[in-house]
Image (cartoon, rainbow, N blue to C red):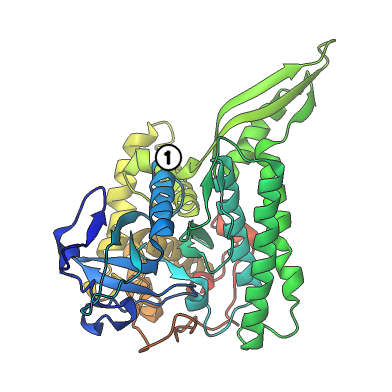
Amino acid sequence: MPQSLEITAANVDPALLDLPWELPLEEWPRSILAALPRGLSRHVVRFINLSGRVIAVKEIGESVAHHEYEMLRDLSRLDAPSVLPTAVITGRRDSSGEELAAALVTEHLQFSLPYRALFSQFMTPDTAKRLLDALAVLLVRLHLLGFYWGDVSLSNTLFRRDAGAFSAYLVDAETGELHPSLTVGQRTYDVDLARTNIIGELMDLQAGRYFPEDEDPIAVGDRIRSRYEDLWRELTAPESIEADQRWRVAARIERLNELGFNVGELQMVSDLDGTRLTIQPKVVDSGHYHRQIMRLTGMDVGEKQAQRMLNDLETYRTMTGRADQPIEIVAHEWMRDVFEPVIEAVPPSLARKLEPAQIFHEFLEHRWFLAQKAGRDLPLDEVIDSYVRNVLPAKRDEAVLLDPGPQDTSEMSAIDAGDPKAPRPGPSSLWGDNAHTEGASSNA
C-alpha cells in the first residue's frame, strides 16, 4: 500500500487496505470483481467482493468524492432511500508515482438493479411507467427532506422490486445539496431535468430496439412531472372543508397513508365565521406500512411489500377467528404459520433469486391464481410446493447476477428480463387478493 494513501471512513474495514489501489480501477483483476451489472456512468465503476459483502468503487475527483460521501452520510442519517457510503480513498499513485483519481466506496444495495440491466431485453411502456412512478416518489421524498438532487435520471437511480411495483434509491449524489427547505424553483428544476434526462434515456432504448417503436418517449417521460405534481399536491397542499365535514380530515390522512406516508402533524385553521376549516399536513414522513411491519415482525421490507403483508396478516386474523385479539399476538402466529413456512421451503439453491419479502408477495400471487383455477382455497403446503417447483426456479438471480463478460460502463448487461407479453396485474391487483393475474410479478 502506498504510504500516501488516505482513507476517510466512519468505520474502516481492514480489508480495504488489501485492494490494489495502485492500479487504475479499470485494470483491477477480475478475480476480485463481483459479477453484477453496471449502469451508465460518467466515471469508471466496479463492484468488488470484500469481507463477505459487495462494495461499489467509483473513480472520481477528490473534492467531488468527499462532497458525495458527506451528502450520502447526511441522507443516511435522514433515512432517505439512497446507497450507504463506506469510504473515500485519496492519495493514490501508480507504480511509477503518477497520481490516480480518488475513489468513493459505497455499499452495494442488494437485490437492486440499474434500469438498463432490468430491461436489457425489452422495456414495455407499462414497466417504464412503473419506474417513473417509483422515481417520482423518490424525488418527492428527497425534496421533503430539503435535498436538491441536481442530476435526476434513471441512470442515477437503482430499483428494487416492491410487490407489484418498484422502489427507487438515489445512487449518485455528486451534485446534491441539502437545505432547510427547497424553493419552488429548485424543485421545478429537478423535475424538469428529470423529464429531459428520462426522455433521452427512453429514446436511447428505443434506438436500440429495447423500447417499442410506436411509443412516444416524450409522452412517457412527461409522466414524471404529472406524477410528481400530483403526489406533492396530495402531501403538502392545503384543503378547505366545511366545518361539519370533519370526516374529510380522516380521509385526507388515510389517502396519505395509502401513498405510504405518515402524518406527524396536521394544521387546521377555521375562517372568521367558523363555517370552514383549512387543513394542511405540516410534517409528512414516509414508510407508513414499512414501520408497521417492522414493529410487528422486525422485518425490514419495501413499503408496498409491507402493505401486502399487512393485508394478508389481517385476512389471517379474520379467517382464524382472532379479530378481537391484539394484532401483535396474531402477527407472531402469522409469522410462524404462514410467512416462515414459505421462506423455509425455499432451497438454498434458489434463495438468492429474490429477497424474502418479494418471494412472499409472489407466493400470494400464485396462491390466488391456484385458488381461482381450482375454485377453492388450497392447503398451504400444496401451494408452497407448487410455487417452489413451478415458479421460483424460472426467476432471475437478483442477489448476484452473472456478469456477461468484460464490458464498458456504457454497455448494457445482457440479462434476461422475461417475456414482455406475459400478463400483468391491473392497479387493483397490487394490493388485494381479488384481481390477480398469475405470472404478473415474474416480469419487470
Residue, far top: 273
Residue most extreme to the front:
97
Name the side, left or right, on which 13 lies relative to 156.
Answer: left
For the question of whether residue 69 can be seen, the reply is yes
Left of 172 or right of it: where is 392?
Answer: left
Residue ID at (42%, 31%): 324
Check the picture and name the quadrant holding the N terminus: bottom left
Q: Amino acid at mark 1?
A: Gln
Residue 397 located left or right of residue 93: right
Q: Where is 209 relative to 185, above or below?
A: below
Residue at image position (38%, 79%) is: 390
Q: Residues within 10 Å of mark 1 (few under 14, many from 20)?
A: some
**Could you say whether the residue bearing mark 1 is in a helix, strand or loop?**
helix
- Seen from the viewer's position, the closer of residues 99 and 229 is 99
Instruction: From the viewer's side, name the closer residue of 329 and 396.
Output: 396
Eyeballing the image, is 44 above or below 144? below
Residue at 39% in and 35% down: 327
How many numbered discs? Answer: 1
Q: 174 or 48: nearer the eye?
A: 174
Determine if residue 320 is in view.
no
The residue lying toward the viewer, choosing from 262 and 79, is 79
Q: What x and y, as percent, mark residue 27?
A: 29, 83
Q: What is the x, y in percent for residue 5?
A: 22, 62
Measured as percent of width and height from the top left, residue 100 is found at 32, 72
Residue 6 is situated, as x and y percent measured from the top left of the image, at 23, 58
Judging by the rendered image, the residue that carries numbered circle 1 is 292
